Image (cartoon, rainbow, N blue to C red):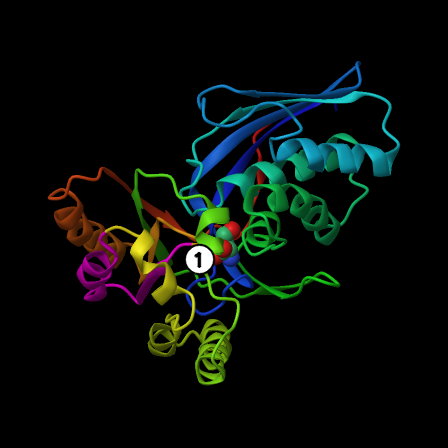
Amino acid sequence: MKKITINVPASVANVSCGFDVLGFCLEEPYDEMTIEIKKTKGVEIKILNEKSIPTDPKYNVCGPVAFAMMKKLNFKYGFKITIVKKIKPGSGIGSSAASAAGTAFAINYLTGNKFSKLELVKFAMIGEEIASGAEHADNLSPVIFGGFTLVRSIKPLDIITLPSLEKLYVVISHPLIELKTKDARLIINKKINLEKAIHQWGNLGGFIASLYTKNYELMSKTIEDVIIEPQRLKLIPNFKKIVAAASTYSIGSGISGAGPSIFSICKGKGNAELVLDAIKKITDKGNIEYNLILSKINTVGIKTIN
Ligand code: HSE
C-alpha cells in the first residue's frame, strides 16, 4: 500500500466545562487527505483549495508530525501530503488538529500500523503545539478515537473514551472570521479562583456522568464554563444572541474550542434543525457572514476513503 485517502473530521474541544481535556468528534465538516510514499526523502505538502496555510513542512502542522514518525521508524523515503481543506483554519473546530491527526493516521497505515491510537495522538500533538503554542490533545483525541474523549493527563498521556449518545446532534455557528488559538489563549488569566474551579470540576464530572446515564437534563446543567468563556466572550461575535436563540430547543451551547465558532448540542435531528433555523434568523440580520453546520456526533473518527 503506497497511498491512502482519508476523511479527517472536525471536532469540538472544551465543551464548556472541560477546558483542554474534553472533546467530541463531528461528522461534518471534514478534510480529505491523500498521503503517498515518495521515493525521495522529505515531506511535500500541497493544499488544493486554501491559500492561507503554509505548505513549507517546517511551518505546516503536518511536517513535524511526519518527520517525528519517519525518525522513529527509521524511514528511508518521504511522503507527499495532498489536502482538500474543508475545515476552515482558525474556526475553532479543530482545523490544525485534523491535519496533524490525519498525517499520523495515514503514515501509520502506510508503514504497517506499528503505532497504537495513543501513540498517534502523541505524534499529532507535536504538530498541534506549533499551531496553538501549547501542548493539548482535546481536539486530537476525538479525531483519532472517535466520539467523546477525556484527556485525563498530558504527561503521561492518558485518554479515556466516553460513551457517545446516538441521539446527539450538534449545530456549529461559524462566523467567517479567523481567530488564532494562540491569540485566544494569550488573553486567558493563568491564575484561577478556587470557588470557580470547584464549580467547573463539578460540571465536568456531571457532564461525564450524564453521558453514562443518558441524563440530558444533567447534561444541560453542566454545559457551563465559569472560567474561560467569560474571558473569551469579547472575541466571539453575537455569542449571547446565538446562545439565547438556540436555548429553546438545545441542550446547551458554548464556545467551540478557542472560538470563534459556537456549538449547540441538541437531542434529536428535529431539534437541531429548529436550533439551526433560530440561529439563522440572527445571523442573516448581521453584517458578519456565517457558515451554519448541522452534524451528528462521529463515533468513528478518521475514515479511510480508499
Ligand atoms: N482547549 C483549546 C483552547 C482548544 O480552548 O484553547 C483549541 O485547540
Q: Is-magenta flag for residue 4?
A: no
Q: Is-magenta flag for residue 252?
A: yes
Q: Is residue 31 left or right of residue 238?
A: right
Q: Is residue 71 left or right of residue 178?
A: right
Q: Where, quadrant-wise, is the N terminus in this rendering?
A: top right
Q: Does mark 1 have its CB less than 8 Å from ligand 1?
A: no
Q: Mark 1 packing: few (<14 Cα in 10 Å), some, or many (20+)?
A: few
Task: Read off the residue under disc 1.
Answer: 187
Residue 153 at what x, y percent from top left?
A: 67, 66
Residue 96 at what x, y percent from top left?
A: 54, 40
What range of the chain is rendered magenta? 238-256
Say which residue appears at 33% left-offset and 52% top-offset: 235
Name the amino acid, label 1.
Answer: Ile
For label 1, the SS is loop
Say which residue appears at 50% left-offset and 73% top-offset: 208
Whether residue 24 is visible, yes or no, is no
Q: Where, quadrant-wise, is the C terminus in this rendering?
A: top right
Q: Is residue 173 left or right of residue 166?
A: left
Up-down: is 240 above or below 300? below
Question: How many discs mark residues in the rendered view?
Answer: 1
Q: Quadrant of residue 229?
A: bottom left
Q: Residue furthest top?
A: 39
Query: 184 or 212, which is in the foreground?
Result: 184
Up-down: is 122 above or below 288? below
Query: 156 or 135, which is in the foreground?
Result: 135
Residue 230 at what x, y percent from top left?
A: 35, 66
Whether residue 231 is visible, yes or no, is yes
Say which residue appears at 71% left-offset and 50% top-offset: 122
Residue 137 at what x, y percent from top left?
A: 60, 54
Q: Is residue 142 left or right of residue 44?
A: left
Up-down: is 29 above or below 222? above
